[in-house]
Image (spheres, helix red, strand yellow):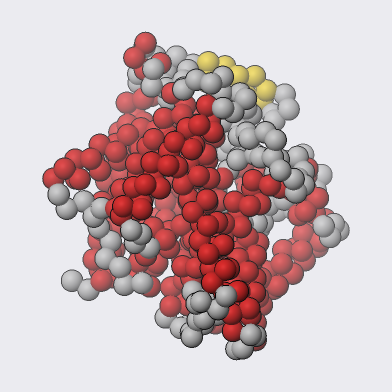
Amino acid sequence: MPLHYHNLKQVIVAQVLLAALFGLIYYLGMHLSFSSVLEGVFPKNYIRQGGWNDYTIIQKDTVFNTPTAARMLSWDAAIYQCMREHLYVQNKNCYDQARLAFYPAFPLLWRLSGMHAIGISVLNFVLLGISTMLISNAYKVWLSWARLLLLFSLPGFVVFLMPYTEALFLFFGALVIFFYKKQHYVLSGSALFFMAITRPAALIYLAAIVVGMLLWLIANRGKNIRWAAMWWLFPFALAWLFNLSVQYAQTGIINGFSSSADALWQGGQWSWPTHISGWTYETFAINALVLTGIMLPAFLFTLQRGWASIMRFDVSKGDFIDLKTLAFFYIAILGVHQFFYTHGSLHGLFRFVLCTPAFFLLAIRYTPNKALLILMGVVSFLLSTSLILNASYTQNAWFPEFNGLPLMALSLVLLFYTEGRSVLSKMAITGLVLLNLLFNAHLYDMFLGNAWVWT
């Protein structure tokens, strides 16, 4: 069977199977009441009512909230809904200031599609599968059941079932990779432009490209850099001009993105963090694992490449940077920014790492040494556990909300380690996928309840 047909079949079956299991788990949760057993697995369920500054938290008896189109317009989804209707036009009493910090591609697509919140969420899930196929076909990688089931069920990947921008950002990034590997550079550059008007995370990719250019200049004494630099940088410049022009045309504000982002995220400054924190217990645990298990190795890899370039140990003969190296640079630079610029806040870290083209490229293409992988998994688990237990607001105790941490650690190790060929590995992967879906169902319920709590 040709590669693209094989991957298409694998992705479709994996997504249909996971969607059915997730729906069954959530349906059962809607019809269960809390018991002493369930309280040991999930925290008490609640729903948030009111605005961002004037709200009340109400506990519910059932495990999960009933999903509706209205409840799917929670948190950032509510802002994107406002942008779908008004984009950046002010005085609409609809997150006027907050909207200025968000990029326009996703709300514009949402408006053009004519879909409601549930429809656009289904489209996001479809884009997840298409993106995976594009990257795997670009590198001629045969997708296995084990890798797909683990990849699509990672704790936190429920974000691909929400009216959020991650799926569209991943899709445009996958197009960049696919067309670049096929040497269709104009199409790849066009996809890079759309990627850069979807999420601010594109600026971290720009920083990663600049780092790659600098290392190339150092290692190759400035040879053959002009064309490559123009190809990579021009789409970013064009996208930034587009973003500013659209916002200025509707608001008359020229620096709305930066000023609103500072206000929304409570500002930032470069300093050594004195307090590590997050917005929820659940995502804080996942983010801690991402920090120690993915970002730290990526940072060490970047340092190694930098030293090799300075000493001219690894002088490239092809293009100025390969996409796998760029993915490591992106994760490393993002880690430095998140850790040293946001006062130690880990909020949203897993979304900026795991839900990106960089991680998907590594998950599909990268094959690390298995012994080293297991060692990294154990060390990162111990480090992240120590981090969450010593955080000031976790009371030095393990809560059910932290269960995503061991699930994420096991999932990442097995994602890179096995193809699921033995009976034992198939049983382990099946059990882990079901636990991941259960944890994702809890996260989805928190989103529907609009009850992400600032911790």
How far across and down, in percent of the image, does residue 253 sit?
Answer: 85, 57
Q: Is residue 323 above or below residue 248?
A: below
Q: Residue at x 42, y 55 (%)?
A: 128
Q: Nearer the viewer, residue 25 or 202?
A: 202
Task: Please state which of residues 391 and 65 is positioned toward the viewer in this rendering.
Answer: 391
- Residue most toward the top? 36
What quarter of the picture does the N terminus occupy? bottom left
Residue 224 visible to the viewer = yes
- Residue at 34% x, 14% y is 37
Across and down, in percent, residue 379 comes to: 42, 42
Q: On screen, 279 above or below 6?
A: above
Is 265 positioned to the left or the right of 277 in the image?
A: right
| Residue drawn at point x = 56 percent, y = 23 percent | 394
Residue drawn at 39 percent across, 67 percent down? 134
Q: Which quadrant holds residue 212? A: bottom right
Q: Is residue 40 above or below residue 9?
A: above
37 on left or right of 351? left
Residue 132 horizontal/vertical position (percent): 38, 61
Q: From where the camera sits, is residue 119 visible?
A: no
